[in-house]
Every structure is written in structure tokens, then in C-alpha cells.
Image (cartoon, rainbow, N blue to C red):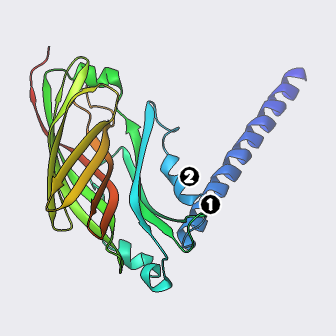
Amino acid sequence: KAAAKKKAAAKKKAAAKKKAAAEAKKAEEEKTEECDEEENPDGCDKERSLAGAWMQDGTSSSFAGGVVIERAGLLQVADQAALLEGLELCRSCRFLEWGYFTEQIPTAMNSLRMGFWVNGIAATSAQLSAAATKQARYSGDLLGMVWDGTQARATQGDFRSTVSFGVANYSVDAFSATFDGGQYSSAARGVKNGSPFRLQDAASGRNFTARGNLFGHPQAVGQPPPEMAGQFSITGNNYQAGGVFGGALVSQSGSDL
């Protein structure tokens, strides 16, 4: 009789746990639907940008980039769906998530911040150290907002990058990007493993800056991280652009230690 009671209690507990899990799943689905239906729901982008960080092993890293539109009018930002149509960030990436956001700036009348975010599982310093003597090449996309004082527009570009790995540091040997008619190139030497890299270039009267990291779990110990991502900004005379970039490993070379 005692065993039967214990079995019944365990069954009841399992049923309650299953019900709680189902309710949590339903609540999450409803929240996702809210975010999809509303144009700019509070907190949706933030929650989405963090989604996945706690679901995977490792540490998360996130970047955001965009532009500030002063005295934004309705016609300038009304058709946001059209701005995003056809945009894609690294179709082959498995460890990255990305999205679009708009937010009002409380201290600036009728001003908006518009841009993109990218989030993922950052490669650990141990994983980078294990790839010492390897060189990896990455290729991917840039997504950004452009503001020239008249109309906000979303633009897509592309980038290529070569990275060399060492026991304590890694180097972005070359980073070249094309965005909105401009071409930029830069490098970052001796970046401490586990830390983000920084890039800077000036071309055709515009300044390009970027900050990024390496993402994902290598397929095998000693292999380079499979993905790269970060944010960028471009400034010039009556011109500003900002957004994110993300790409995947396309080839590698080098020998094991």
C-alpha cells in the first residue's frame, strides 16, 4: 500500500512537471507571436538577442550597431518591413542570431535609434589556443542602417577576413568590407585570446570602425572557431551608417602543434 501511494505521488509530480513545462512553452510561443505582430514591442529584441545564450555551453557575446535619426518623421521610418525585405546575415551560420530594433531616445525629441543586433556563443580562449598555428578565412555579410539626413534605409554588404591563431593571442591579418558603395580594409594584431578585436580604416572621406569576436564550437579540438561576428559604424560628411556583420569559416590551413 505504501509503495502504491509512493508510485501515485511520483506520477502526480511528473504530471505537474509536464504541465508546467507545457505552460512555459505556451507562454514563450505567445511572447514570440507578440514580438512578430507588434511593430516595436518593448523588450522583444532584448529577449531575442539573449535567447540561446543560456541554452548552450560556453559564454555569450552580443553586438549592436545602428544610427540615430534626429527629429524623425513618420514617413522616414513608417515602412520598416520594406527596409528589411530580402536581408540576410550569414545563412550558413549555426551559432549566431540576429535581429532589427528601433527605440526612442528619451532625452531627444522625436529622435530614434535604428539598427541591428547579433548574438551568439563566443569561442573560448582555450578553443582559440588549441587552434595555434592555424590560419582561417571567413566570409559573410554586413547589415546596417544608413542615414544621410533625408531618408533611413537598410543596406547589405559583405566582408572577407583572415585570422591567424596563437597560444596566447590571435591576429586578424586582413579584414575587407564593402558597404553602401564604400570599401574598407583593416587588421588587428596580437589580440588576447578570448577578447574582441577592433578595426579602423578611413576611405573616401569616411571613417570605418568595427569590433568583433569569434563564435561557435569547433568541430574538433584544435580547429578554428566556425564563425565571426561583430558591429561596425561608418561616419562622414552628413552621413552615418551602423550595423552588424556575421560570417562563417570557408577554409583553413596550418599544422597541428
Which element carries disc 1, helix, strand or loop?
helix
- The answer to the question of whether label 1 and label 2 lie on touching residues, with beta carbons closer than 8 A, is yes
Residue 180: percent from the left, percent from the top?
A: 21, 67
Q: Which residue in the rendered view is the most extreme toward the top?
A: 257
The kind of residue on which mark 2 rests is Glu
Image position, residue 3 (x, y; %): 84, 22
Q: How many marks?
A: 2
The CA span between labels 1 and 2 is 10 Å
Please indicate whether residue 97 sits to the left or right of residue 197 in the image: right
Foreground label between 1 and 2:
2
- Earlier along the polypeptide chain: callout 1 or callout 2? 1
Q: Which residue is drawn at 45% across and 31% down?
A: 57
- Image quadrant assignment for residue 233: bottom left
Residue 197 appears left or right of 113: left
**Residue corresponding to mark 2:** 47
Instruction: Please name the residue that numbered disc 1 is placed on.
Output: 31
